[in-house]
Image (cartoon, grey):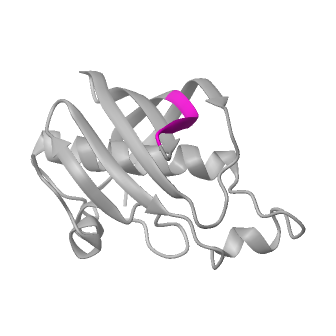
Amino acid sequence: MTQLNIHEVLEYLPHRFPFLLVDKVLSCEPGKDICALKNVTINEPFFSGHFPHYAVMPGVLIIEALAQAALILSFFTSNEKPDEKSLYYFVGIDGARFKKPVLPGDTLHLHVTLLRQMRGVWRFQAQAKVDGELVAEAELLCAKRDLQK
């Protein structure tokens, strides 16, 4: 099983600050699953507006963090890295549920399992946990598309 530090994560994700939401990969088994981490700090730019009186990580960013972990799994499964000729698009979310708020100081554990890949569309089951408790879950769909230049 593969582990990645932040420098290696940057090789597999085209995202950069402030939209890079994966700090570390604990394990990745191509074609199967990935477990990654997002350390949630009070310095995140979204906390100044969501919400100033009680900082809560936006649910859409939890889903985005799961999608970024899914993207790393896609690249590992395909044995490739991002390039300037194509992008993986987030094309669907099914059954998203948010169970508990994610707060500054939490470590978000991102668990993503590949359900299937067909005709360039990838379907994943994704769960986010804090201290072993489920905070969010969804099925995610991503698709690789060539860029027209």
Is residue 28 located in the magenta-colored stretch of the structure?
A: no
Q: Residue at x 18, y 58 (%)?
A: 81
> With respect to residue 66, does 142 lie above or below?
above
Q: Quadrant of residue 123?
A: top left
Q: Nearer the viewer, residue 30 or 82?
A: 30
Residue 136: in magenta span: yes
| Residue 68 x %, y % | 41, 51
Task: Give the vertical position of 123 relative to 55 (above or below).
Answer: above
Expressed as whole percent of the image width and height from the top left, the position of residue 53 reads 90, 67
Q: Please identify the residue farthest to the bottom as the structure is shown.
A: 43
Q: Is residue 125 visible?
A: yes
Is residue 146 visible to the viewer in this orientation of the structure?
Answer: no
Overall secondary structure of the magenta stretch? strand
Q: Which residue is at 80% across, 62% downward?
A: 50
> Which residues are the magenta region?
132-138
Q: Residue at x 49, y 40 (%)?
A: 128
**Which residue is most to the right?**
53
**Left or right of 125 in this view: 81:** left
**Residue 72, relative to residue 136: is it above or below?**
below
